[in-house]
Amino acid sequence: MAAISFSGVKKRYQKNDVIHGVDVEIEPGEFVVILGPSGCGKSTLLRMIAGLEEISGGTISIDGTVVNELEPRERGCAMVFQNYALYPHMSVRQNIGYALKVAGMPKAERDAKVLKVAKSVSLDPYLDRKPGELSGGQRQRVAMARAMVREPKVFLFDEPFSNLDAKLRVAMRAEVRNLHRSLGVTSVFVTHDQTEAMTLADRLIVMNAGIVEQVGKPSEVYHHPASLFVADFIGSPAMNLVRGFFAEDGYFRHGNGGMIRLPGLAPHHLSQEVSVGIRPELVRRVDASDKNAIQATVDYTEELGASRLIYARADGSTIIAVDTRGDALGTGMPVHFAFDEADVHVFSHDTGRRLDAPGRTHRSSATVSA
Amino acid sequence: MIERSPIFNFVTYAAMTLGLLVVLVPFWIVIVAGSQSLQEVSRVPIVLWPSSHLWDNIGTAWARADLGPKMLNSLIVAVGVTTGKIVLASLSAFAIVFFNFKARMVCFWLIFITLMLPLEVRIVPTYAIAANALLPFQVILDTLGITGLVEAISSVRISLEWNLLNSYTGLILPLVATATGTFLYRQFFMTIPDELVEASKMDGASPVRFFFDVLLPLSRTNMLALATIMFVSSWNQYLWPLLITTDRANYGTVVMQLKALIPAQNGTPDWNVTMAGALIIMLPPLLIVAFMQRWFVRGLITKDK
């Protein structure tokens, strides 16, 4: 039985639909990250699980019970908020123990539990401080301790690290990961930060404009994007994408007039507008003598230390490639690239969905004639 | 605007000193006159230096205006208005800010409109209500014909009456029903982040619990500021107590007694006693303000954030 299951879940504000029917199952103990650009409805979806937003259509069940009509406190969820949402007038101890106090737990038992949880996130020296006297990372840990102390069925995280600096964020990420490993509680984590999403998630839910674009393991989502949106959104630098048509001669003709030889793909996607894409790290630098080389001119390069990014132009479109050669490259210099046809993704322009050629297993090189 | 030049500084200080004089000179005259004997206070030109008869004058004023019981009355009214106001203001603001009900804006505007109708404007209808607090219900029953119907059937005439004249309730209630406190609280409640409300929902706290555990402790400075304002203003009420209490001996307040201390047309012009009495009467609000000043200022400053 799924820990959380969405069935045709919709959200409507007045007349605007913001979530258009979500169907997803989350397994018990799974760490699921909902990823998407701002305004895609990911936080709304999370808040609907928590009971902070009403569900306009469809059902959400937790542990097999439909929770649409249940109050937040009856759903067994604990939530960590973006701005911590700690009670400013209460000490750390009172903040963590408040839910237990409301539930009517005797003081001695409550204090013991609070202490135990505080120790597990190394907050025990700060129990008598007010939130105002703590650093951002400590406040975030109080917020997490407050969620943990209730021993919930589900943890919900609403962009919890967006107020922290980069270093602390990485540390907190590891902490959340360890926490999940040791407690094994089903967790749903909302973020717009894809590194955070990729590193934390057992499974990713990629959302855009109120629609679930893809659900899958991080590597699956990266290597096998189900839609043009996912292909473009996931990965930094973004995937190289060009729009155009395949022709019967085995060439792909893109809008800027250039042609790419993709004989393996061409026959399957004739007579419809498509976008083809390839990840920058799969674009190889080759010598000018290579018979498959695409010639391009360097726009600029970005040094990353271990590698560098080359932004180049070929036939009026930009190519981004990850390069490990150490030679000097200046603006305007010629470079040559090649890639494997098997690494190329094809997306329908009309639906934005991925197009997979039936039985396409061979890898052939692409060549270009300008 | 920040501007610094010797002349500008001089002008600023001159204006402030002048303002201070305007405020403090009457006060000084009260203290001076209150400490003089009858001969000294009647001297022309007036002496602006205190004398040694302050305690005698205070004693005389206290006895003449019966200030002991009247002080108690004033205290009951002021504390009653202050508490009533804080309870009403915090609860009504809580309803308006945190609950999304259909008549929310209507309620808000109804409260808002009372700001435009101070007690002095609605004094006649307020008096009518105070004379019989159930009058509106009687009118409703009469217009709907229920009174006549009941009379026809059972020959019992419905006549609702609840007289508030000459009572603490009558002195307090009309002063409680104003919008200022609700506004102060509304402004404060609107600064409470939504996430705090949601966190308490997730923690399982009911709205009432949230009100007592989170909102009230957070609004402490606001509450003290409101308490100060309300205490002072209700202590200083003159018109309403004058209207509603015919039984001065039992329900008179100190401010009303000020009138009793003013020398009669052809009596002894003992203004020294009058001033000593005024000094006693203005002392409690003064002490409250002095004591609460710190929170008072903080509460008013943070209200608009």
Image (spheres, grey):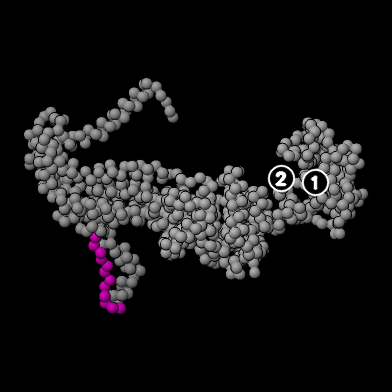
Residue at the (64%, 50%) spot, across then down: A196
Nearer to us in this view, A300 or A208: A300
Residue A15 visible? The answer is no
Q: Are marks 2 and 1 on the same chain?
A: yes
How packed is label 1: few (under 14 Cα within 10 Å), some, or many (20 or more)?
some
Residue A282 tag number? 1
Dominant secondary structure of the residues highlighted in magenta in the image: loop
Q: Is residue A138 visible?
A: yes
In percent of width and height, residue A255 lies at: 82, 44
Q: Is residue A333 left or right of residue B93?
A: right
Check disc 2 and report the residue beneath it.
A236
The quadrant where residue A65 appears: bottom right
The magenta segment is B153-165
Q: Is residue B261 magenta?
A: no
Q: Quadrant of the C terminus of chain A?
A: top right
Q: Is residue B55 above or below residue A201?
A: above
* Residue B190 percent across, percent down from the top left: 45, 50
Q: Quadrant of the N terminus of chain A?
A: bottom right
x 10%, y 44%: residue = B60
Q: Which three-letter amino acid code belongs to the residue tagged 1?
A: Leu
> Where in the figure is residue A249, as x and y percent of width and height?
92, 49
Specify the amino acid type for callout 2: Ser
Residue B162 shown in magenta: yes
- Write down the chain letter for disc 1: A
Q: Are marks 2 and 1 in contact (CB under 8 Å)?
A: no
Q: In the picture provided, is A311 more to the left or to the right than A92?
A: right
State the image coordinates of residue B63 (x, y, percent, origin top left): 10, 48
Q: Secondary structure at mark 2?
A: loop
Label 2: chain letter: A
Density class for disc 2 (Cα within 10 Å; few <14, some 14-19, many ≥20) is few
